[in-house]
Amino acid sequence: MLRRVLLILAAATLLSPGPAAAAARTSIFYYPWYGTPQVDGGFMHWQQNGAAPPFRIASAYYPARGTYSSADKLVLGAQMDEIERTGVDQISVSWWGWGSVEDRRLPLLVPAARAAGLDVAVHLEPYGGRTAASTAADIAHLRELGVTDFYVYGPQDDVPDSWKAARATLPADVRVFAQTTMVGWAAAGAFDGIYTYDVLVNTGDRFVRLCEQARKAKLLCAPSVGPGYDARRAVGDMRVRPRRHGRTYDGMWRSALRAGADMVTITSYNEWHEGSQIEPARARTGYKGYDGAWGMRGPDAQGAYLLRTAYWTARYSLTRH
């Protein structure tokens, strides 16, 4: 089993578009908000909802590399190399406005990603007071880092006319995606494409119809696939989408490929709070592991979702040729 998945990984690496590609085909959502006492003076995010790290964290899963700081250059380098080996060619970094922790960490993250041959996009989160006009100003600021792809989470906090006016002020090489399944709304707002992000509600069964509608509206279709969802420990949300030993992830990928998606977005690399991460996890008392995923167990299972992502990016790359 291990030998077979390693061969799949090697094939995906050879087939991945690489840094010379004109535009990303696969993008994975990445969260740079974690912190530790050793690096940041205190825990950040691991302690959410009353958790007491490093032994008890705000997640249903426990990271194989332990609680880490997203400002640790060694961690960043290892994570970027890990993502690059999956064949994913872009990371979309969660960003919460000027001066936020996520904003301050971008200058560390961007060179680490590019050193691994990854493109960098920004996931514009719904920070307080965000409007279409302020988002356009944010994009102009972030464009100085060489970022040209932007994903707007929850764009319904403003009206389509405002988004259309904001879009008209942006450079022609910028692409802006709206997180929505309302294609007409996104077209009215002059967005370049749509993505879904949510893998709890948007399970993949409507990807074909969604992408058909997007093509008719001349929008890019970038549906989001993910392994599952479990945010009970982090935010008390009792809704769960089980991983089913990898079958949930496979099903969403199949749906995206069947839809002829222009891009595939992945939720997520490391959103540990919502249990949607594919970053390696290890078995630990009180925490889920990836044992059983695609028949893998023990240490081999820790990276099961990275290996399976390599398999799917390789298949997707073949469909785009």
Image (spheres, rainbow, N blue to C red):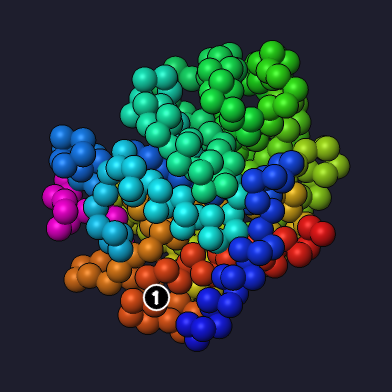
Left or right, 174 with reference to 199: right
Query: Relative to the observer, which residue lies in front, 110 or 60?
Result: 110
Query: Relative to the observer, which residue lies in front, 37 or 292?
Result: 37
Q: Quadrant of residue 60?
A: bottom left
Question: In which quadrant will I find the C terminus?
Answer: bottom right
- Report whether residue 64 is seen: yes
- Report whether residue 222 is seen: no
Left or right, 234 with reference to 128: left
Q: Position of residue 63 (x, y in %)?
A: 30, 60
Mark 1 element type: helix
| Up/down of 296 relative to 210, above or below | below
Q: Position of residue 263 (x, y in %)?
A: 69, 49
> Which residue is identified by label 1?
301
Give the amino acid at mark 1: Ala
Q: Where is residue 226 in the image (x, y as percent from the top left)?
A: 52, 58
Task: Assess disc 1: are there few (<14), some (14-19) or many (≥20) residues with their C-alpha within 10 Å of its C-alpha.
Answer: many
Q: Which residue is drawn at 34% across and 42% down?
A: 73
Q: What stretch is highlighted in magenta?
A: 50-61
Q: Position of residue 45 (x, y in %)?
A: 27, 42
Residue furthest front as drawn: 115
Q: Which residue is drawn at 33% across and 48% down?
A: 74
Query: Relative to the observer, which residue lies in front, 205 or 130?
Result: 130
